[in-house]
């Protein structure tokens, strides 16, 4: 898989898992900030790919190049409403990306970060590690 294929598989998985949230999600290089007036029941997300190193791995007689990285999903909610809404979305992201394979892209166990104030929002980031092999 090349990087374009990996990005497409990630976008597809996200769109399938969060169809109702995709309009409120910003992907890499598409700009956008959380809405100024986010309602108490609304969530805004960003989905970014952090590329790791591409390394050669040997699996039997077949040479492979393994691309590793992390999908980082930032979940934003309104401040001062508690963390319940954000944590429910964290659980959904973890479930969507936990140890699944999508078109040859293998996701490992996601790790949620610590919730914090980010501007006028409450934010929790979820890191979803992945790898994909390109057989040469």
Image (spheres, rainbow, N blue to C red):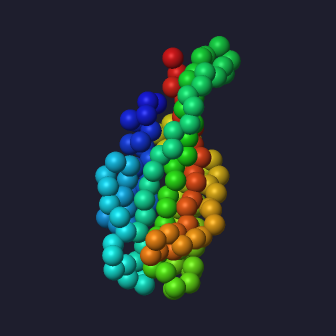
Residue 15 found in image quarter: bottom left
31 shown above or below 130: below
Q: Position of residue 80 (x, y in %)?
A: 52, 85
Residue 14 found in image quarter: bottom left
Q: How many marks?
A: 0
Which of 129 and 120 lies nearest the eye of the viewer?
Answer: 120
Q: Residue at x 55, y 61 (%)?
A: 125
Whether residue 19 is visible: no
Q: Position of residue 88 (x, y in %)?
A: 55, 74
Q: Residue at x 56, y 84 (%)?
A: 82
Q: Residue at x 49, y 61 (%)?
A: 74
Q: Position of residue 113 (x, y in %)?
A: 62, 62
53 shown above or below 124: above
Position of 19 compared to 104: left or right?
A: left
43 shown above or below 100: below
Position of 39 compared to 62: left or right?
A: left
Which of 119 and 71 lies nearest the eye of the viewer?
Answer: 119
């Amino acid at each position: 898989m090349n990087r374009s294929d990996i990005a497409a598989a990630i976008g597809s998985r996200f769109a399938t898992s969060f169809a109702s949230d995709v309009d409120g999600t910003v992907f890499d290089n598409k700009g956008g900030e959380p809405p100024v007036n986010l309602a108490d029941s609304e969530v805004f997300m960003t989905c970014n790919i952090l590329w790791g190193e591409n390394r050669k791995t040997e699996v039997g007689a077949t040479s492979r190049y393994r691309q590793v990285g992390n999908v980082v999903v930032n979940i934003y909610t309104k401040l001062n409403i508690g963390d319940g809404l954000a944590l429910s979305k964290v659980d959904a992201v973890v479930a969507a990306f936990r140890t699944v394979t999508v078109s040859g892209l293998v996701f490992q166990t996601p790790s949620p970060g610590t919730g914090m104030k980010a501007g006028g929002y409450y934010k929790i980031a979820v890191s979803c590690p992945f790898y994909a092999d390109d057989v040469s």
